[in-house]
Image: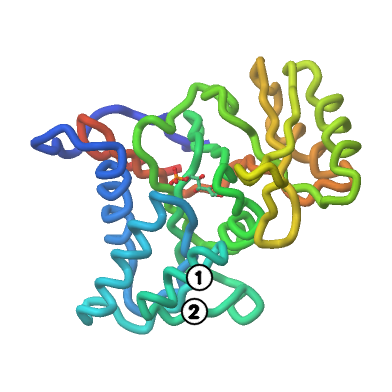
Amino acid sequence: SSMKALSLSPSLSPPVILTQDELKKVAAFKAVEFVESGMVLGLGTGSTAKHAVDRIGELLRQGKLNNIIGIPTSKKTQEQAISLGIPLSDLDSHPTIDLAIDGADEVDPYLNLVKGRGGSLLREKMVEGACKKFVCIVDESKLVKYLGGSGLALPIEVVPFCWKFTAGKLENLLRDSGCVARLRNDGKGEPFVTDNGNYIVDLYLKKEIGDLQVAGDAILRIAGVVEHGMFLDMATTVIVAGDLGITINNK
Ligand code: 5RP
């Protein structure tokens, strides 16, 4: 394949050291340059995607973009888009989306992603799976050698019914990677509940997963699993903002 590994050669150099949030904004604004009037747009979720949605709203308000239809990937993004006056629809009415812009928790050298730390992985996967183009936007802290390599969780959306049983199945499936499964909580001692009324089981891995596609398929075959947070071969472009500038990586 013509998949290109991430290169660190900068295409432009910001004059100052930017904060992580400013880097997220730089990546987001760059991605919005790909948006054209008349497009159906997948609107991502998280602190990086939020900048892109803000920018789309701004361009609509200024009349620099017209006839945009947004397909939000979470209730939170839906609320943000409504507050910005972005016209919205859904996958039922628009099963084909021109372009989605969304963040990620991890990006590997083949542009595979981990998503779902924000808990929106199911809607994100449905929307981004329906896109002709999926532009992923990250600051350089998200780059990893392999998925799971940041030490952060691989999120799995599961049905609440007997989630411990499902978590045990997941640990057993990925035991060669030293998998430990934890139910995500909402910070107030209750389980975190997704927009779809499900729970998130976070998987922590000590070792690299061998074949991601095989592991992903096996995870989906466990009854009780709704979706996993590996986005394999889905991003068509990854925009990375770092101290040395912006890098645009096309698959
Ligand atoms: C939500 C996601 C987010 O895109 C991911 O968590 C990145 O978030 P942030 O831009 O806030 O770092 O997958 O489910």
How many residues crowd mark 2 within 10 Å: few (<14), some (14–19), many (20+)? some
Q: Is residue 27 above or below residue 79?
A: above
12 horizontally vs 212: left or right: left
206 horizontally vs 85: left or right: right
Q: Quadrant of residue 250?
A: top left
Mark 2 near mark 1, Cβ–Cβ under 8 Å?
yes
Residue ID at (47%, 49%): 236
Measure the C-alpha gap from mark 2 to mark 1. Answer: 8 Å
Q: 4 or 145: which is nearer to us?
A: 145
Q: Is residue 116 above or below residue 173?
A: below
Of the residues shown, which amino acid type is indicated by label 2?
Answer: Leu
- The residue identified by callout 2 is 88
Q: Quadrant of residue 242?
A: top left
**Residue 139, percent from left and from top:** 35, 38
**First in sequence: mark 2 vs mark 1:** 1
Q: What element carries label 2?
A: loop
Q: In which quarter of the image is residue 21?
A: top left
**Residue 215, percent from left and from top:** 76, 32
- The residue identified by callout 1 is 78
